Amino acid sequence: MTMSDQDKTPQAEEQMNPEAVVEEAASANGAEQAEAAVEVDPIEALQAENAALKDRALRTMAEMENLRRRTEKEVKDAKAYAVAGFARDMLVVNDNLGRAIEALPDDARENDDNLKALVEGVEMVEREMLNHLEKHGVKRLSPEGEKFNPHFHQAMFEVPNTEVPNNTVVQVVQAGYVIGERVLRPAMVGVSKGGPKVAPVADKAAEPGSTIDKEA
């Protein structure tokens, strides 16, 4: 064996045959791709895609249902409260009719037949106006004897009274009105002071006046 034959190592042979190196690399790459193709199951891929589309469709349907309910509520509120401004103005007219009747002395009503008939006519107009307002959802608040509620009542003064629970409406100065769930005008009231106080509730936070301590 000559010296030149000993120098021919496998590495030297690979360098001398680049085509063999390229073929080997291509063969290895093809084997990896074939293995990856075998690992991806087309049925599982379709099932995953179907689940994703189903989830997207359910989300879209839920959003559309929420939009429908919100729009329905807005339309309902618009119909219910469309006359709120007009009703509030009519309450001022109704109050003036009531004041006109109250300004007349009782003896004048009884002694003057013409005046008596006029008062009866004004009272009829007042009742008719309230009836028409009620048809449009306007209701009158007469809270005398009820627990004071700052959402519906406006306290004008306090009345010392130990016989009724504290913060009870004992006098209504001016009636209040609501339309639907909204307050057109709070009732102006006088509330009691010095009566039985509110008893705290142990298990949950109670609203002021929800329970009465009868032993106080």
Image (tube, grey):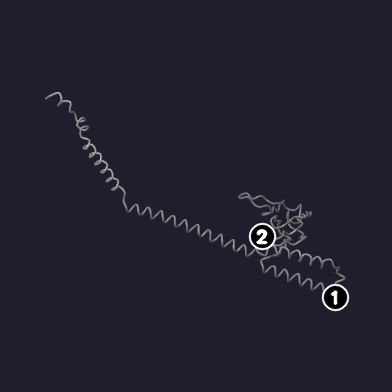
User: In the image shown, does 40 or 214 lie closer to the viewer?
Assistant: 40
Q: Position of residue 33 (x, y in %)?
A: 28, 45
**Displayed quadrant of residue 112:** bottom right
Question: Which residue in the protein does label 1 denote?
Answer: 114
Q: Is residue 148 left or right of residue 36?
A: right
Q: Name which residue type carries label 1.
A: Asn
Q: Is residue 98 above or below residue 26?
A: below
CB atoms of marks 2 and 1 within 8 Å: no
SS category of the residue bearing label 2: strand
| Residue 96 in the image, given as x and y percentages of width and height | 79, 65
Q: Is residue 177 left or right of residue 23?
A: right
Question: Where is residue 184 drawn, in percent x and y?
Answer: 70, 60
Dot label at residue 204: none
In percent of width and height, residue 132 lies at 70, 70
Q: Is residue 177 left or right of residue 59?
A: right
Location of mark 2 (residue): 182
- What amino acid type should be assigned to the residue bearing mark 2? Arg
Quadrant the N terminus occupies: top left
Q: Residues within 10 Å of mark 2 (few under 14, many from 20)?
A: few
- The residue positioned 31% from the left and 49% from the top of the image is 40
Count the numbered circles shown. Answer: 2
Q: Quadrant of residue 84?
A: bottom right
Q: Secondary structure at mark 1?
A: helix
